[in-house]
Amino acid sequence: MTEQPTVAAPYDILFEPVQIGPFTTKNRFYQVPHCNGMGYRDPSAQAAMRKIKAEGGWSVVCTEQVEIHATSDIAPFIELRIWDDQDLPALKRIADAIHEGGGLAGIELAHNGMNAPNQLSRETPLGPGHLPVAPDTIAPIQARAMTTQDIADLRRWHRNAVRRSIEAGYDIVYVYGAHGYSGVHHFLSRRYNQRTDEYGGSLLNRMRLLRELLEDTIEECDGKAAVACRITVEEELEGGITREDIEGVLRELGELPDLWDFAMGSWEGDSVTSRFGLEGSQEEFVAGLKKLTTKPVVGVGRFTSPDAMVRQIKAGILDLIGAARPSIADPFLPNKIRDGRLSLIRECIGCNICVSGDLTMSPIRCTQNPSMGEEWRRGWHPEKIRAKESDAQVLVVGAGPSGLEAARALGVRGYDVALIEARRDLGGRVHQESRLPGLSAWGRVQEYREAAIAELPNVEVFRESPMTADDIIEFGFQHVLVATGATWRTDGVARFHTTPLPIAKGAQVLGPDDLFAGRLPEGKKVVVYDDDHYYLGGVVSELLAQKGYDVSIVTTESQVSAWTTNTFEVNRIQRRLIENGVTRITDHAVTAVGVGGVELKDVYAGAVRELECDAVVMVTARLPREELYLELDALRERGELESVRGIGDSWAPGTIAAAVWSGRRAAEEFDADLPSNDEVPFRREVTQLA
Ligand code: ADP
Ligand code: SF4
């Protein structure tokens, strides 16, 4: 009998084991440390979130950065702490949960150095030199140049933290030297380290602290845990850490840790949104480093495509596929690849709403994965949802992100669902916005849900079917979810003006809905008035500039798209607008629109001036399309319908993430015995009094 040659399935290579110190992974999927806005405030919630990732196939699941000492305090942020034994129960809960899920648990120990303003502890910040603390919005204070005694103290604190990490059950212990959030990074970088002692000057001296911390950690772990080092490969700042530096570090220290985790010089540089960076955009900085060490290397790149992952391994760039955001959007990504369920991968769209959770100290949220952050609080799971409790049939009106998610989740529960959409295309705002410059990846919100719904025979989709209340009653539906979305206002009402501003007869005023429908301004000079402050004002300006208009964007904030500081986009947006020739007029409101121009008012001094233009595009507030809901609710009160619920933007306009979440919530709560709204609608972890 001739033996059949075995042909490796295309993604088998992703399921090979990798040796990390004393441990062997079950595959190459590695959830790198990532912040989550839950930190020390919500440890059980974080434990449940990490456990689900381990269940979903991530062979290693790490914590976020964990402050090792009270001099490393990044308040007001709430990242985990391992200051002393009091912190161990929370850390142990997280490690145990990861183990229960079937993963190896990693802990990222961090001394934040001059990035720690110590607002809570009021200790003096510590750095290589006398320089201002890095987060300038938190405290106008300076770090003190560390003495050799301070360095000895730091080494002891780090050792204590390593010992405690092992006690808490972690398998992989990090020495953190990346993202500008770590003293190790500051010592490595000439930008901050101008010392003249044995810790400054030559690269060997600048890496001395890293070497010492690695040696201490290896000794303290003593084979009980693996040692990982997360390091900046490129600082992307004048005078910062360079490729040459990092190659030198690897030549000297390459064999010390059991794993290298490559990162960029800032979190902003690592977590680039899809508007500004493609999948795998770190490759140019990471490629070639692996050959400088025999130890496994992990790196990130917003990897969601298994082909791109395979390429990273086969090209010898990475040994482990690192992910933060792709593991947030789809905790079951590894298992879905393993099982060949590729069309059901909830691909990260690269919007950084997850980042905004951490930066606003709110539990992590995700546009694609509404269960993210709700695993413990509300018992939601990214793949599972409890079975239906009745034979009710549900009508969902509107197939934007909220309607799509509600229909999908109700369908998974087993209900018969009719999803009815007025337009030919599904997706609502996501379908429209994904056609704007830089936002194509947003279409994944719709694509995933359409693919999931296509597998559900109990969900029927009807297109080009605008529904009225009479239609709904006529068709006999008893349960209706109204997901009809919102309309952009064109009267100037938003944050600055809460009543309509004067608009002259004959003035040309458009809103985003006009642009979505293909209606463009007449003339050459356009003013975009942005009092929304998220992405759309900037995107619309970019679109119009690309179409040849002479564009000025007027915003009441000091930067265009000011809120995108929370998605790490604000700086790139200014640069892109400048590159597109858009004039930015900040700190001004449009106070009147005439024919041929607008009146602008300085928001501080009140000075008024005129600006010539042919047309104005208002990116201001939205009004919910709530008429259908109001009519149906009146019918429900008269007993003609059993239940009606408004969801998404038709209930209250917000982010796409909020709309998806609201669709999921409606599906979770359908047929549920809900407590009164006098009660807190989710579980909380309340601090025990000392
Ligand atoms: P959300 O973000 O809340 O999901 P969207 O604005 O993205 O809201 O989507 C709302 C969708 O509802 C749009 O695709 C719109 O065409 C559709 N829609 C609005 N009114 C009706 C209606 N009366 N009947 C059917 N579909 C509707
Ligand atoms: Fe990706 Fe956006 Fe989800 Fe973050 S919030 S994981 S960027 S889809």
Image: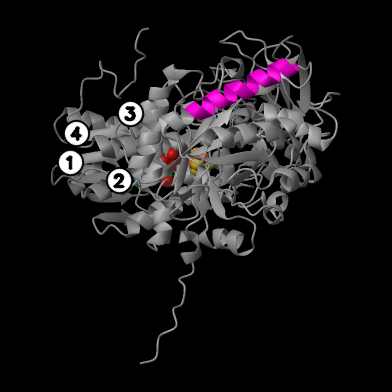
Q: Amino acid at mark 2?
A: Ala
Say which label, 1 or 4, has the lower sequence index: 1
The answer to whether 445 appears left or right of 376 in the picture is right
Residue count near mark 1 (Cα–Cα under 10 Å), binned few <14, some 14–19, many ≥20 = some
Spatial separation of the CA atoms under disc 1 and disc 4: 16 Å
Spatial separation of the CA atoms under disc 3 and disc 2: 18 Å
Say which label, 3 or 2, has the lower sequence index: 3
Q: Which residue is mark 3?
A: 377
Counting from the top left corner in percent of width and height, residue 446 is at 44, 50
Q: Which residue is mark 1?
A: 478
Q: Which residues are magenta?
A: 146-163
Say which label, 2 or 1, has the lower sequence index: 2
Q: Amino acid at mark 1?
A: Gln
Q: Secondary structure at mark 1?
A: loop
Counting from the top left corner in percent of width and height, residue 142 is at 74, 13
Q: Amino acid at mark 3?
A: Arg
Q: Secondary structure at mark 4?
A: loop
Asked if the stretch drawn in magenta spans residue 147, the answer is yes
Say which label, 3 or 1, has the lower sequence index: 3
Say which label, 4 or 2, has the lower sequence index: 2
Say which label, 3 or 4, has the lower sequence index: 3
Q: Residue at x 59, y 44 (%)?
A: 515
> Which numbered mark, 2 or 1, is in the foreground of this view?
2
